[in-house]
Amino acid sequence: METYTTSEAAKILNVAPSTLRYWESEFGNILNIQRNENGYRQYSKENIALLKEIKRYLYEQKYSIKQVREILNLEKSKQDIAATLIANTDPNTADFLHALLEKFDQIENGIEDLKNGQKHLREEYLQAIKLLSITQERRDRELIKEIRYRLNEKKVKNSGLIHKLLPWGKDK
């Protein structure tokens, strides 16, 4: 069985080794990370897959540690219950339970798609706000330019008037 050290796992997941140690402290009962004879953590492929899922929940979907723990415990409970039910039922009921579990998975995938869609809409909204801000800045610059132009025209007009009114401003 192939295993990874903490630094190798951190590199695979693109997180700091301290993050992995923290996640182990929070999700230890779910992760069940083995240690070698020297006490070093040994991450299995299953651990890496579960850590990727944890990272996705935390970083992409912005769930809290507590929420992720509840989700993972719920998934584990669901799998345990399904395995127990299927083992203790007749074939027709087992087929029904399999179909039901597939529907649950489809619903969860649909929820996931909706969350991803919501994330994309939020990103598009922020981009639109940014574009509006840029447009407003352009409009403000044009307005300032126009004000400066008009003030300069008045200044030129007024300086000509001053030269006409004042005796030392006249040319002889």
Image (cartoon, helix red, strand yellow):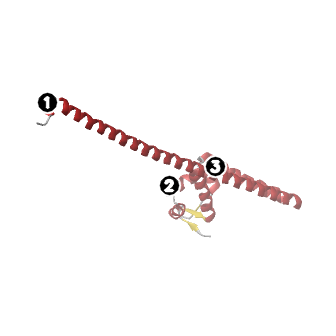
Q: In which quarter of the image is residue 43?
A: bottom right
| Mark closest to the chain's N terminus, 3 or 1 | 3
Q: Quadrant of residue 54?
A: bottom right
Amino acid type at circle 2 is Ser
Does dot 2 land on a helix, a strand or a loop? helix
Residue bearing the label numbered 3: 69
Q: Do the residues labelled 2 and 1 touch (CB within 8 Å)?
A: no
Q: Do the residues labelled 3 and 1 touch (CB within 8 Å)?
A: no
Residue at image x 59%, y 55%? Answer: 56
Q: How far apart are marks 2 and 1 (CA)?
A: 83 Å
Camera-nearest label, 3 or 1: 1
Left or right, residue 87 beside residue 123: right
Q: How far apart are marks 2 and 3 (CA)?
A: 19 Å
Amino acid type at circle 3 is Arg
Q: Are marks 2 and 3 in contact (CB under 8 Å)?
A: no
Residue at image x 29%, y 35%? Answer: 154
Q: Where is residue 123 in the image (x, y as percent from the top left)?
A: 56, 50
Left or right, residue 125 beside residue 159: right
Does dot 1 land on a helix, a strand or a loop? helix
Residue bearing the label numbered 1: 167
Which quadrant is home to the N terminus? bottom right
Structural crowding at the residue carrying mark 3, measured as other residues with C-alpha within 10 Å and reported as few (<14), some (14–19) or many (≥20): some
List the single residue furthest toward the left: 172
Residue bearing the label numbered 2: 18
Q: Where is residue 128 in the image (x, y as percent from the top left)?
A: 53, 48
